[in-house]
Image (cartoon, helix red, strand yellow):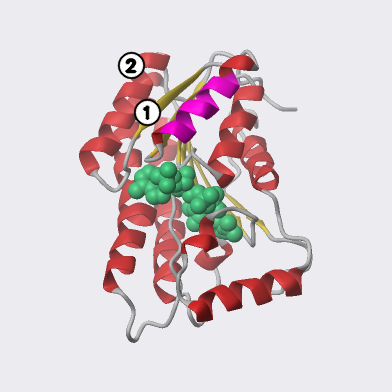
Amino acid sequence: MAVDLQGRAAAITGASSGIGEAVALSLSRAGAAVALAARREERIAALAGRIAEEGGRALALPTDVADEDQARAFIAHAYEHLGRLDILVNNAGVMLLGPVEGADTDHWRRMVDVNVYGLLYCTHAALPVMREQGGGHVVNVSSVAGRHAHLGSAVYNLTKFGVNGFSEALRQEALHSNIRVTVIEPGFVDTELAGHNELELVRQGVERMREQIGEVLTAEDIAEAITYAVTRPERVSVNEVLVRPTRQQR
Ligand SMILES: NC(=O)c1ccc[n+]([C@@H]2O[C@H](COP(=O)([O-])OP(=O)(O)OC[C@H]3O[C@@H](n4cnc5c(N)ncnc54)[C@H](OP(=O)(O)O)[C@@H]3O)[C@@H](O)[C@H]2O)c1
């Protein structure tokens, strides 16, 4: 049976679109107060307004998670304003695909800074707060790309394989503080993520994959998986959830 999140507080990174936005709505509807982080201030402010209209409580905190001070301030402000920190959803991410040879190395830095360091900074700031509070839950949004490597995805694979390894090691450490760790691995979800790719080769590859799959996942499908994981009774730790569209092969 699902645990009611009434009186709980959740911090969600990458809440301005896609999966993060859907998770914020879903956790709010399950009863949690939510703190929203992303760089696009107007998007998170609008989402906070929508949540308030629905009768929920949301706080928009413009944040670049790749900046350690900003990531730390996000967690501190979320805790300060909401009075608790029960759930951290490390969802902010960037996926810039293409061959290794000739790649724009700035794309590599952006992926490592957001997908890896952003997640590390927020987790590092949240752990002592959760421990002192008596427990918590860290949800790391990885990818099917954290399990299976593919040509053209090398550095994105590197970041998501890293998230998977980190999550399992963190799980073993944090269980002593009553902190649960879940890694979520979505397959193809219809969001803005792939749209940031400028290489024609990559754009065509993404479109081919979408056509092969047919009906891809929605952000709400992943939000439901995350909401499931964080509403289990305390004795239940859902450690890993891989969700693909039914017709996605790899
Ligand atoms: N879509 C898929 O098929 C898929 C599959 C597997 C895994 N995932 C993972 O799911 C997560 C969410 O992606 P999505 O599909 O929902 O894509 P999306 O719609 O592009 O959302 C990405 C989110 O990350 C935020 N973000 C990017 N850089 C940031 C930074 N420096 N600081 C703070 N926030 C930042 C963006 O907000 P701002 O731009 O406003 O900062 C946005 O809210 C990512 O970790 C992604 O790797 C997605």
Residue 224 vs residue 166, the one in the foreground? 224
In what element is the residue under mark 2?
Answer: helix
Residue 23 vs residue 38, the one in the foreground? 38
- The C terminus: image quadrant: bottom right
Q: Which residues are magenta?
A: 42-51
Q: Position of residue 83 (x, y in %)?
A: 40, 13
Q: Residue at x 32, y 43 (%)?
A: 65
Q: Quarter of the image holding residue 246?
A: bottom right
Magenta-span inclusion, residue 49: yes
Examine the rendering and report whether any part of residue 240 can be seen.
Answer: yes
Q: Can you identify the residue that label 1 sits on? A: 61
What kind of residue is marked 1? Leu
Relative to 168, say whether 232 is above or below.
Answer: above
Foreground: disc 2 or disc 1: 1
Measure the C-alpha gap from mark 2 to mark 1: 12 Å
Q: Position of residue 226 (x, y in %)?
A: 61, 41
Q: Position of residue 80 (x, y in %)?
A: 33, 16
Mark 1 residue CB less than 8 A from any atom of ligand 1: no
What kind of residue is marked 2? Glu
Question: How crowded is the residue under tag 2: few (<14 C-alpha within 10 Å), some, or many (20+)?
Answer: few
Mark 2 residue CB less than 8 A from any atom of ligand 1: no
Does 1 sit left or right of 205 as displayed? right
Q: Quarter of the image holding residue 32?
A: top right
Q: Position of residue 216 (x, y in %)?
A: 72, 60
Q: Residue at x 59, y 23 (%)?
A: 50
Question: How crowded is the residue under tag 1: few (<14 C-alpha within 10 Å), some, or many (20+)?
Answer: many
Q: Can you identify the residue that label 2 sits on? A: 80
In what element is the residue under mark 1?
Answer: strand
Relative to 166, say whether 98 is above or below.
Answer: below
Which residue reaches farthest bottom? Answer: 101
